[in-house]
Amino acid sequence: MPVEHLAIIMDGNGRWATERNLSRSDGHRAGAKQIAKVVEAAREFGIKYLTVYAFSTENWKRPADEVRVLMELISEFSSNSLSDMLKNGVRLRTIGRTDDLPLISRTALKQAIKATENNRDFTITVALSYGGRAELIDGMNKMLKERKSDEPLTEAEFRNYLYAPDIPDPDLLIRTGGEMRISNFLLWQLSYSELYVTPVYWPDFGREELKKALDSFAARDRRFGGLNDKK
């Protein structure tokens, strides 16, 4: 079964930089450059959707200078990647409480999202000021305001209140940097996703590392709580 939707927790920028006697900001800049490379590789391998965890609701607690650099990188990514996204049929989307981002970052994102909204070959969704619990709370609050029915709520109906209900659940979650946790990422959507954790830091994660993860996925037996007919 091929991977249609890949999710990535892009971890290890700071440790990558520290091991090279660089600043954490240098690590984040190196990590930002990897996104375009992984998008290119993902498209090559036939993946249709890529969701990357770029900035969590908890990341606002980091030092102000580090947050400032991350916000600048969001603006740069939106602007600098636009021509390539248009050329390659890539659609940009975001999930999260993006109203919390600085105006300049929101503006750059909105321009890129609008310019690429009709592209359908590949979709990259960037999770910004995102938390899985926040998404569930926001969905519940939206449902309480909009829902009129007295019928019992179903999973399929509640899904419509999530940030991106039209995107299929991830087949595979990759976490770089070696940490063994999902860090409040896509709590609803990852219910039956396969997990792949690599010690490779995000700035060093490229095509060959992605292929290793996809090869691992291809060897899995996905049963979704049931039994494989071959067993």
Image (cartoon, rainbow, N blue to C red):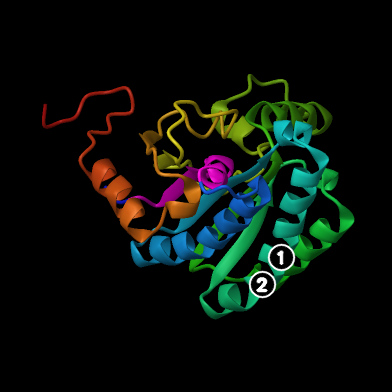
Q: Position of residue 31 (x, y in %)?
A: 56, 54
Under circle 1, the secondary element is helix
**Could you tell me residue 91's position as x and y percent?**
59, 65
What percent of the width, then of the height, locates residue 130? 69, 38
Front residue of 62 and 140? 62
Amino acid type of the residue that numbered disc 1 sits on in the rendered structure: Glu
Mark 1 sits on what residue? 76
Label 1 neighbour load within 10 Å: few <14, some 14-19, many 20+: some
Residue count near mark 2 (Cα–Cα under 10 Å), binned few <14, some 14–19, many ≥20: few
- Residue at x-position 63% and y-position 54%: 26
Residue most extreme to the right: 103
The numbered mark at residue 80 is 2
Quick check: 112 above or below 147?
A: below
Q: What's the residue at 51%, 45% (across, down)?
A: 16
Please state the extent of the stretch shown in magenta in the rendering.
Answer: 3-19
| Cα separation between marks 2 and 1 | 6 Å
